[in-house]
Image (spheres, rainbow, N blue to C red):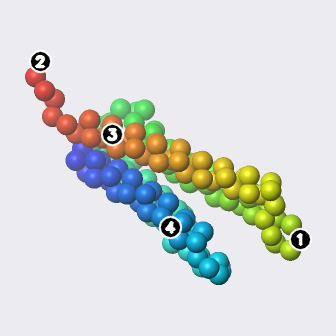
Amino acid sequence: MRRAFVVASALLLATFVLQFAFAAVGAFTKPAGDGAYALHSVTGMAVIPALTLLTTLFAVLAKAPGRLVGLSLLPLGLVVVQALVASLANAFTDASGASTPLGLTVAGLHALNGIIAVHVVVSVHQAARKLASPVTAA
């Protein structure tokens, strides 16, 4: 199970890397229609939560310390924060639906939260690898 924990955490990390690429696809799509962020949205709202739960399940089955189990579940909470920040940023538009400085500032928090999530997943993956590594004799 420890090896499965390593693999699941690696898949979660790879998915976060793709998530940044999908955000760039949305940002650079011209004209930016409703579907510009489709890959980013689906990955963030479905794939990442599912992989986070799978990673957490393998952490529990691998008998990881409680702190590591909690850390492996943290990306799910950060995804909820991502959705809230995105909604809040969209709420700060002007009457014509255009972005405002306040909305753009709040949107910047979306990117910062994503960076924090990546750091959490890197930590989980490193800890999973350490947990799975054979113990060397002293």
Amino acid beneath label 1: Ala
For label 1, the SS is loop
Mark 3 Cα shell of 10 Å, populated few (<14), some (14-19), many (≥20): some
Mark 1 vs mark 3: in front: 1
Residue 95 is tagged as: 1
What's the CA distance linking mark 1 and mark 3?
47 Å
Query: Which percent across, then down, holds residue 35?
Result: 60, 79
Distance from disc 4 to disc 1, alpha carbons, whole Å, reads 28 Å
Q: Does label 3 or label 4 sit earlier along the sequence?
A: 4
Q: Which residue is mark 4?
A: 22
Q: Are marks 3 and 2 in contact (CB under 8 Å)?
A: no
Residue under label 2 = 138
**For the residues carrying marks 1 and 2, which lies nearer the camera in this image?**
1
Tell me which amino acid carries mark 4.
Phe
> Which residue is at the far right?
95
Which residue lies at the image location 46% right of the left edge and 43% below the top edge?
119
Mark 2 residue crowding within 10 angstroms, few (<14) / some (14–19) / many (20+): few
The answer to which of marks 3 and 2 sits earlier in the sequence is: 3
Tell me where residue 38 appears, x and y as whole percent.
56, 74
Helix, strand or loop under label 4: helix
The residues tagged by marks 3 and 2 sit, at their Cα atoms, a distance apart of 22 Å
What amino acid type should be assigned to the residue bearing mark 3? Gln
